[in-house]
Amino acid sequence: MSKKILIVDDHAIIRMGLKLMLEGTDLEIVAEATNAAEALAAVEKSVPDVVLMDIRMEGGDGLNALGRLKLDHPDLPIVLFSAYDNPTYIARAVALGASGYILKSATRERLIESLNTAVAGESAWTREELRRVTGALATPRLSQDIEVPLTQRESEVLRQMALGLTNKEIAKMLGISYETVKEHVQHILRKIGVSDRTQAAVWAVRKNLV
């Protein structure tokens, strides 16, 4: 029996490429979506065995969609599929319950193996991926329900950090200078009590800021 896959990616060429890569396997693409809203509807309609979802998409963040899907379908395996080897993305994906994280540069064998592993209900995370974020996920301060007095601007900057944006991208998004963003980031890390952006991203996820 074939394993049903929902593909969520806003680039047609990626979706076409995935179809070619999965030809001759027992992994069948039964539905496609181009954004988070379509993905939520497609899960209800097609009832896939696994979802393979991009992160940066027009019309919605794949990580936010992951969180929403996991609320309604906690047992549905969802594998993130991204061009970005971004530790912040990886930390958020782990914290939100993704079954794995595959780079778009990965081999066909790695993709197929990860999807089969996820369908089987097992973790498709590699040891290296988990090692990179273990410290962030295990930081004691992050698990405590502590109210941190962030200013409105700091909260905006933290939200963009947790979405994986660089300081330069945040500056452009918020219409402020690069140096101002750097100052906000330093204040945020100090207030939260963490040492890097990945830990800050996990904290933001657990506080439902993203």
Image: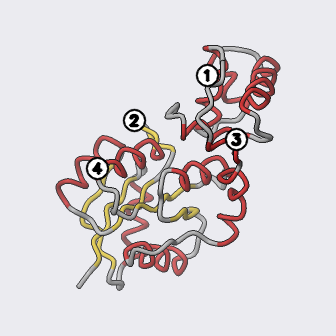
In this rendering, the label closer to the viewer, 4 or 2:
4
The Cα atoms of the two marked residues, 4 and 2, are separated by 20 Å
Q: Give the x, y percent position of residue 44.
A: 20, 53
Helix, strand, or loop for circle 4?
A: helix
The residue indicated by pointer 1 is 155
Q: Amino acid at mark 3?
A: Arg
Tag 4 near tag 2, CB within 8 Å: no
Q: Give the x, y percent position of residue 129.
A: 66, 64
Pointer 2 local density, CA inside 10 Å: few below 14, some 14–19, many at least 20: few
In this rendering, the label closer to the viewer, 1 or 2:
1
Asked if residue 47 lies left or right of residue 74, the reply is: left
Q: Sequence order check: which comes first, mark 4 or mark 1? A: 4
In the drawing, what numbered circle is on residue 59? 2
Pointer 1 local density, CA inside 10 Å: few below 14, some 14–19, many at least 20: some
Pointer 3 local density, CA inside 10 Å: few below 14, some 14–19, many at least 20: some
The residue indicated by pointer 4 is 72
Q: Is residue 56 above or below residue 120?
A: above
Residue at screen point 53% across, 53% down = 93
Tell me where residue 12 sits by quadrant. Answer: bottom left
Q: Sequence order check: which comes first, mark 3 or mark 2? A: 2
Q: Amino acid at mark 2?
A: Gly
In the drawing, what numbered circle is on residue 16? none
Helix, strand, or loop for circle 3?
A: helix
Q: Sequence order check: which comes first, mark 4 or mark 2? A: 2
Pointer 4 local density, CA inside 10 Å: few below 14, some 14–19, many at least 20: few
Helix, strand, or loop for circle 2?
A: loop
Q: Sequence order check: which comes first, mark 3 or mark 1? A: 3
